[in-house]
Image (cartoon, coloured by chain):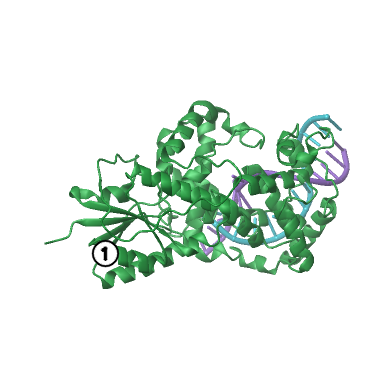
Chain colours: A green, B purple, C cyan
Amino acid sequence: MASSRSILWFRRDLRVADHPAAVHAGRDGREVVPVFVLDPALVRPSGAVRLAFMYRSLRSLNESLGGKLVVRHGQPDAVIAKLAADAHADEVVVTRDHGPYGHRRDAAVAERLRSLEIAFVGKGSPYAVAPGTVVKDDGNPYAVFTPFFRAWSTRPHPDPLDVADIDWIRPRIDHDSIPADPDVGCALPDASEHAAHELWDTFLREGIDRYTSRRNAPAESGTSRLSPYLRWGQLHPRQLLADLGDAAGPSTFRKELAWREFYADVLHHHPESARENLQRKMDQLPLDTDATARRRFDRWATGTTGYPIVDAGMRQLLATGWMHNRVRMITASFLVKDLHLPWQWGARHFMQRLVDGDLASNQHGWQWVAGTGTDAAPFFRVFNPTLQSAKFDPDGSYIRQWVPELADADVDTIHQPQAPIVDHAVERADALRRYRAVTGR
DNA sequence: TTTTGAGTTGTTCGA
DNA sequence: GTCGAACAACTCAAA
């Protein structure tokens, strides 16, 4: 008798609504075994806050699945092959993963399954337009955002998908439990799919119209805060695009979604850019990596540089697993341009701790700041932490929240460095000198 | 093939 | 205080 049972292997699509892979797995009344693999490669490099959010997302998904989610620790190729065999499934269905690690992992899994004569089927992607599909007329990928955005905007993307009843089952097979949350000592966003939709609805009602101006002020709740849900898949961007109008706020927000898609596309075409400079000529940039550099990195990471806006951002990250985007740019620029450290050091720190940490957006955001990525990036673009602070946190309330020793500081002095580890004017000049060395002038 | 216009998010200087 | 130019040169995309 032919088997009619599928495994749906969840990865970064932790939702039950609007899920093409789930619909495919459950077609024609097939039974579907929902699975998540706690891959050491995913767990090991994650900090406590990031892990806690992942575990909560899994618990919430499990609830949505009526408690049927099968969780296993281990190497995906071995785990999935064994699960598929034990569960008597004849196919494994996934949402495609376009990242460099995901690509390798899935190739290994597909190989193992092939030897067992079990199908491995990819449906959909975490993006509105799958990475690799927006190309120039000559067939090559875009390397500049604006033309990519124009082309991407004309691409049809499917409407959110109605998921009818799926026959989720949990056969009698081995499973592990979802680990208890590490101690995080802070409030995290609600990790449920429902909370993600609620947040989006509220943002559409109350936030989107003023998004263009308010999104830059770190003290205000002017951003959508949807990034963790886009990272883990509680929401799919096609839902957001379907709900967006054409006014200024929605257009700005749509562009931010397009940046996410652009960076995924760039990483898809240049998987090595997760670690290496996209512009290889920037390998010549002189950087500091000695003991002093490592000490300075620690001061940056712990939020003790003496630059209030930098320290506020780094402490917000440590405390909550999230940092306002404007402050991500400021802190990143400080690491690269004021401390002359490799962007990879900062990118790794962010990825370990951000609950929304997405490889493509994170690495290429850093590369943009470092001037090694897709942007023409004039080398003289160096963020001045004091000016940025005064401009975007004018009354200093963001600083007051995260740097308590400055809570009562005067508004005229709160942006000024206090016992700074470096002098911005000096380091700016040094950064320009180093960047000039690359271009040979 | 050649040409042309443009390129997320900035800062400083001097008029 | 405000505003425009300069900061360099290169690559990309499209006509």
Image position, residue A17 (x, y; %): 34, 41
The vertical placement of A118 against A338, above or below, is: below
A222 or A80, which lies in front? A80
Q: Is residue A379 visible?
A: no
Callout 1 secondary element: helix
Tell me the residue at 31%/67% (across/down): A82
Label 1 marks a residue whose chain is A
Tell me the residue at 34%/39% (across/down): A159
- Residue furthest out toward the left: A1
Q: Residue type at mark 1?
A: Asp
Q: How crowded is mark 1: few (under 14 residues within 10 Å), some or many (20 or more)?
A: few
Image position, residue A424 (x, y; %): 82, 51
Looking at the rendered image, the quarter that the N terminus of chain A falls into is bottom left
B12 or A206, which lies in front? A206
| Image position of A126 (left or right of A350) | left
A238 or A115, which lies in front? A115
Image position, residue A436 (x, y; %): 76, 62
| Image position of B1 (left or right of C5) | left
Image position, residue B6 (x, y; %): 60, 46
Q: Report the residue marked by disc 1.
A: A86
Q: Can residue A140 be seen in this view?
A: yes
